[in-house]
Amino acid sequence: DVSMPVGIAPVGLTGLNWANGEILGARAAEKFGIPFTLSTMSICSIEDVASAVAKPFWFQLYVFRDRGFAASLIDRAKAAKCSALMLTLDLQIQGQRHMDLKNGLTVPPRLTPANMVDVLCKPSWSFNMLRSKRRSFGNLEGQIKGADNLLTLSQWIAGQFDPTLSWK
């Protein structure tokens, strides 16, 4: 049952916009009686969100080449009592985001004078993010053999998407 016919769609990296962003989003959805969908590419893990809310939420799953890892995410979502599984294909071919490259939003992140000024002009955001314990992909971190830092994790992610892939 929902209070209105809307829900919060999966948004990756919400926790980089504000510390614990996915947890805050799930709590807001719960308060207003609408579904919340946690992204596979979230900063807060399935378990982090499940421990912060009383009602079940939905989980969005990418169709990864690594079927074993995808199955482990499904098992984790079941254990967290997620009430729906959403399959999405929007990262099968990664987009070229020229402004991200210009702004230093790369892996590993590149500090530029412009983004240093930007951070300094937002002290409340900066302090909020410094206090957060979550700074990586919560559903992936520590789960993938050989992907023990942001660069190797990013390389693993990039290798998981294939536009010709079929799940048999």
Image (cartoon, rainbow, N blue to C red):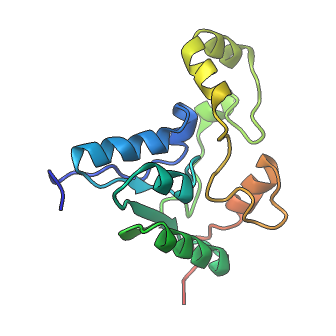
Q: Can residue 150 be seen?
A: yes
Residue at 47% of width from left, 57% of height from top? 50
Residue at 53% of width from left, 38% of height from top? 20
Task: Point out residue 130 in the picture as x, y percentages from the top left corner.
Answer: 67, 26
Q: Is residue 130 left or right of residue 1?
A: right
Say above or below: 139 vs 130.
below
Task: Point out residue 36 in the picture as x, y percentages from the top left corner.
Answer: 35, 53
Residue at 57% of width from left, 70% of height from top? 73
Say which of 161 and 40 sits in front.
40
The image quadrant that residue 129 belongs to is: top right
Task: Tell me the quadrant of the picture where the C terminus can be found.
Answer: bottom right
Residue found farthest to the bottom: 168
Residue at 80% of width from left, 59% of height from top? 147
Q: Can residue 103 be seen?
A: no
Task: Point out residue 4 in the picture as x, y percentages from the top left corner.
Answer: 14, 51
Q: Is residue 141 left or right of residue 8?
A: right
The image quadrant that residue 37 belongs to is: bottom left
Q: Is residue 96 left or right of residue 51?
A: right
Say which of 38 and 33 sits in front.
33
Task: Tell me the quadrant of the picture where the N terminus can be found.
Answer: bottom left
Q: Please state the total of marks drawn on the protein image.
A: 0
Q: Is residue 100 left or right of residue 23?
A: right
